[in-house]
Image (cartoon, rainbow, N blue to C red):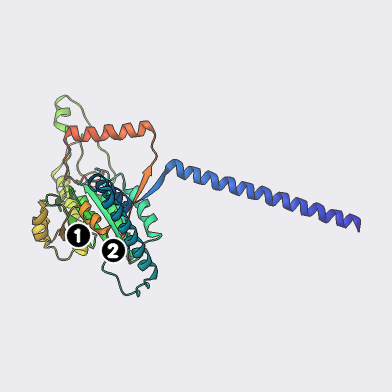
Amino acid sequence: MDYLYGYLVFLAQAVTVVIAILVILGVGASSRLRMRQRERGHLEVRKLNEGLNALKQEMQGALLEPAALKKERRAQRKTDKQVAKSRAKSAPPEPEEVPAAPERIFVLDFHGDLQASRVQDLATEITAVLTLAAATDEVVVRVESQGGLVHSYGLAASQLVRVKEHGVPLTVAVDKVAASGGYLMAAVADKVLAAPFAVVGSIGVVAQIPNVHRLLKKHDVDVEVLTAGKYKRTLTVLGENTQEGREKFISDLEDVHTLFQEFVGTHRPQIDLEQVATGETWYGQRAIDLSLVDQISTSDEYLTRACESADVYRVHWVEHKKPIERLAAKVETSLQRWLGVDIHSWRRPG
């Protein structure tokens, strides 16, 4: 009997040790996962109402007399308490009812280059927002882009479609430019805002391919372009281009243009595509007349007004990059500007 009791005690101790080891390993693995996530980047969420209130208080401190300032601060605290109390008591709306003013607004920023290289960051920000956002909220995306690669901006637009499919109202604000791929993104929104001189439109496709075949031929340099598939390579930089290849290339561009128009027409059926799908761009009021945008307003004006009735949060994914990666990105941007790359171009993937 003593032998059996000793064995059971030993067994219990062994099980306890195994469980302790598993717990330690699990905690270690979880810590390593969080560490890898932190190494890749982190999410920043900042309440814009607080920044606006801070600016207001600084102005009051500079302009008001001490007695008036004290009275103003007391009145503001009273108002804040009343707002908080009314929000706590308010009953949730019925599922089919959407209030005129959102309770929370989530603000995202997308500054697009030719490759739309921030599309993965945008996807992460949208994923984070959709974990909490509801139909009573709103997502505002401030888009600034001059266009770029077809597939990259197609993916960026698809990320914005996720917001609408989630049932959350989507607004896109254009302060400077949303042309070509940038407008493809803007067209997804329920509401498009544009500053008075913001550039929108450019529903068109362009591709530029240099060809040095005649130069190489002049110097007796032969280039063999070998393909499997009739249209694997229609136009090349080094080889001799044919009329058939040019016609196929143009046909592909026309097909992309048609897809572009169909996408915009699906999300903004009020647009006369025959009138606007010419590759042109428009400013402010002209864009409203053509139904490309819905309202003339800067993002600052829209969000400042929204802070009066809603909690406004800026959500931003910060990617951690090594110094050499940051330097390479700056060099690439500088080269694009120096070389004068067509800022409204949609460059066809190879």
Where is residue 84, by image quadrant?
Answer: bottom left
Which of these two is toward me, 32 or 209? 32
Q: Is residue 214 left or right of residue 16?
A: left
Disc 1 secondary structure class: helix
Label 2 vs label 1, nearer the camera: 2
- Of residues 219 and 75, the one nearer the viewer is 75
Please identify the residue farthest to the top as the structure is shown. 219
Residue positioned 16% across, 32% down in the render: 213
Query: How many marks can you see?
Result: 2
On screen, residue 80 above or below 335 = below
Residue 264's disc is 1
Disc assigned to residue 169? 2
- What label does residue 59 carry, if any? none
Identify the secondary structure beneath mark 2.
Answer: loop
Is residue 233 visible in this depiction of the protein? Answer: yes
> Which amino acid, by three-letter code, is at mark 2?
Pro
Give the percent coordinates (x, y) of residue 283.
10, 52
Instruction: Give x and y (percent) for residue 194.
Output: 16, 54
- Other-residue count near label 1 (Cα within 10 Å), few / some / many at <14 / 14–19 / ≥20: many
